Image (tube, rainbow, N blue to C red):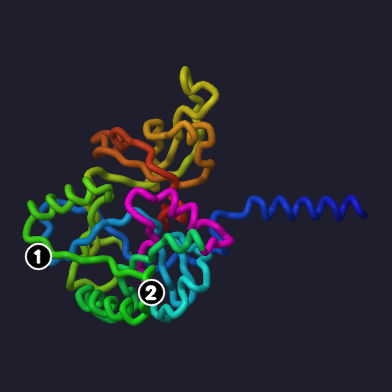
């Protein structure tokens, strides 16, 4: 009996030692998702903001959730006084600090000191009955009323033409930013991917699921040479470029999702051209129907 109890205790210890990256899982929040910007978009209809390289987070009125529906365990003071209406935004530290942001957000026991380095950058009020023009104005009042320095509203700009848009993109990239987001002013919030929300980067990126670790050769002998990944459409290809030494020694686990960058698609196969690993995509789920 004692041996049985000891075995059970060890099993419990092991279970908690390999806890999931985020806390209890919920249904994915109803988020608006962005299409890729293309020439010919009527820019006069859009607001433009910097695309922040953080963790997409949705405040549902009582808790913070990732894009995939995992609960983000924040200190109680962080969300104290927040409204019962949903907020859509990004948990963000600073440009170029994505990995550090993820390491803070994924902890099941939050560190007050580390959370004080984060901001919730709000960019929409999903449940507010109005266009983005109206929601953006209402969001300004909500943020001002709460009056917390770590709750900020993402700044929105207007640009005159495509040349001004490209100049803004170059300036953001030169300062370490990721890209731009365009939000149609007269659009209503829809939990779908559409042209009301657009992203503009100097490259394309997407997500794929890790299905195999391919062994390395020569200088990568004994490590992972490449990841075999599968896109939501079922296409398989390799990701070798972009992996650091640490990632080759301890690669993303099978079944995890990763973000990669690429330069267009192969016309015949549809496989991304020059794919390059960027990072593990926390809280990402395969799109429904795939």
Placement of 141 over or under 243, stated as above or below: below
Taking depth in this image into account, of 123 and 77 the one nearest to the observer is 77
Q: Secondary structure at mark 1?
A: helix
**Residue 188, position as x, y percentages in the image:** 25, 73
Q: Residue at x 22, y 76 (%)?
A: 131
* Between discs 1 and 2, the one toward the N terminus: 1
Q: Residues within 10 Å of mark 2 (few under 14, many from 20)?
A: some
Residue 285 seen? no
**Is 266 contained in the magenta span?**
no
**Residue 206, position as x, y percentages in the image:** 34, 46
**Residue 84, position as x, y percentages in the image:** 42, 81
**Residue under circle 2?**
148
**Is 96 contained in the magenta span?**
yes
Q: Residue at x 46, y 27 (%)?
A: 225
The residue most toward the front is 113
Q: Which numbered disc covers residue 136? A: none
Q: Kindly report which numbered mark, 1 or 2, lies closer to the viewer in this rendering.
A: 2
Q: Are marks 1 and 2 in contact (CB under 8 Å)?
A: no
Q: Secondary structure at mark 2?
A: loop
| Residue 72 appears left or right of 17 | left
Residue 257 seen? yes
Q: Residues within 10 Å of mark 1 (few under 14, many from 20)?
A: few
| Residue 160 appears left or right of 195 | left
Magenta region:
86-112
Q: Residue 227's image quarter?
A: top left
Q: Residue at x 21, y 65 (%)?
A: 183
**Residue under circle 1?**
44
Taking depth in this image into account, of 186 and 99 the one nearest to the observer is 99
Q: Residue at x 49, y 52 (%)?
A: 103
Find the distance from the CA under tag 1 to the CA under tag 2. Answer: 32 Å
Placement of 75 over or under 251, stated as above or below: below
């Amino acid at each position: 009996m004692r041996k049985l109890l000891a075995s059970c205790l060890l099993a419990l210890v092991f279970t908690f030692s390999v806890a999931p990256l985020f806390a209890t899982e919920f249904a994915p929040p109803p988020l608006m998702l962005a299409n890729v910007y293309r020439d010919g978009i009527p820019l006069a209809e859009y607001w433009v903001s910097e695309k922040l390289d953080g963790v997409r987070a949705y405040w549902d009125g009582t808790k913070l959730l990732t894009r995939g529906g995992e609960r983000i365990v924040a200190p109680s003071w962080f969300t104290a006084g927040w409204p019962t209406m949903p907020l859509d935004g990004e948990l963000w530290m600073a440009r170029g600090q994505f990995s550090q942001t993820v390491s803070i957000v994924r902890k099941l026991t939050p560190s007050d000191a580390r959370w004080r380095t984060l901001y919730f950058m709000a960019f929409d009020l999903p449940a507010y009955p109005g266009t983005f023009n109206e929601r953006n104005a209402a969001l300004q009042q909500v943020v001002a009323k709460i009056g917390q320095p770590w709750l900020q509203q993402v700044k929105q700009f207007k640009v005159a033409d495509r040349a001004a848009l490209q100049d803004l993109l170059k300036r953001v990239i030169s300062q370490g930013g990721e890209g731009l987001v365009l939000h149609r002013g007269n659009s209503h919030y829809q939990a779908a991917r559409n042209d009301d929300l657009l992203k503009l980067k100097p490259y394309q990126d997407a997500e794929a699921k890790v299905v195999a670790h391919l062994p390395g050769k020569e200088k990568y002998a004994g490590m992972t040479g490449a990841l075999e990944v599968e896109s939501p459409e079922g296409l398989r290809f390799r990701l070798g470029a972009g992996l650091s030494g640490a990632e080759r020694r301890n690669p993303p686990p099978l079944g995890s999702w990763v973000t990669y960058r690429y330069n267009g698609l192969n016309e015949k196969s549809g496989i991304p051209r020059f794919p390059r690993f960027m990072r593990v995509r926390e809280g990402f789920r395969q799109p429904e129907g795939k």
